Image (cartoon, rainbow, N blue to C red):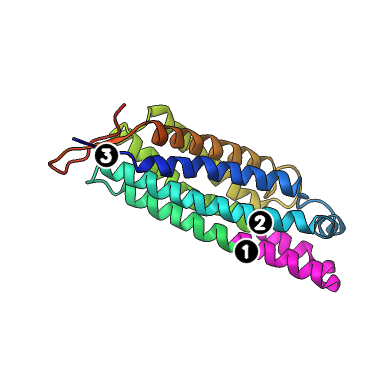
Amino acid sequence: MKQSHELRWGGLAGVASILAALMGRLVMGSAPQLTEPAMTISGFLTERRVQVLAAALLYAVATALLLWFGVALATAMRRADETSDAPALVLAGYVLLAAIGFIGISMFAGMTYAITTHPPLLAIAAGPYTVLTVMDAITGIAMTVPFGASAAAIMRTHLFPLWMAWLAIVVAVVAVLGAFTIVNTGGAVVPGGPVAIVLGVLTALWVLAASWFLIREHLPIPATGARPAMGH
């Protein structure tokens, strides 16, 4: 038996991704809701231009780190069960989320830069802002891939405690509910509203928990090549 410790770096990347995302949120501040007037949205982008662009960079860093975490997580699950398709779905899911994330973040930063550089565009700022917020909500459907697959892999291999599987299922369900908020154009249940906040908190908790297990545990790899679940 030899000990495999490289996955701990993936766990550290998961923790760092949550910290970078939290810093981005704090730097940008409270963004306007879609139900607020168009002038409020354009005013926010104008007055907090530097903070918004800095937050976009932090979110981009968080997305790259989250992808690293996803690769490590998928590797751990593959080593625990090489006959399952779940690890491949986990990896594909995190790659998909990273691709969508980079596109959305780049578009948001580009929109802010263009609107604040060319003042006449402020009149239509609410348009692309709304589009990107709705796009973020629909991304909840994509989140069901890595979290649903993670739940299946955990139940099959017991790589992590069973409550991690149930929490992953809850995250997936809330993500789907968040996607369906696009049917509403008013009230509290709209894209970017309370459901998105709950989803963000639950996702952060799950990533932090999984990262902790990756950091403090290891995958024993038998000389025969079989790879059992993570040991203590």
Q: Is the N terminus in the top left, top right, bottom left or bottom right quadrant?
A: top left
Under circle 2, the secondary element is: helix
Name the residue tied to disc 1. Answer: 106
From this view, report whether residue 100 is shown above or below residue 220: below
112 in magenta: yes
Residue range corresponding to the magenta coloring: 104-133
Label 3 CA crowd tier, 10 Å (few <14, some 14–19, many 20+): many
What x and y, as percent, mark residue 47? 85, 56
Question: Which kind of residue does numbered mark 2 sit on?
Answer: Ala
Identify the mark nearer the N-term, 2 or 3: 2
Which of the 4 image quadrants contains residue 25? top right
Name the residue tied to disc 3. Answer: 80
Disc on res. 56: 2
Which of the 4 image quadrants contains residue 3? top left
Pointers 2 and 3 in contact (CB under 8 A)?
Answer: no
Question: Which kind of residue does numbered mark 1 sit on?
Answer: Ser
* Residue 165 in view: no
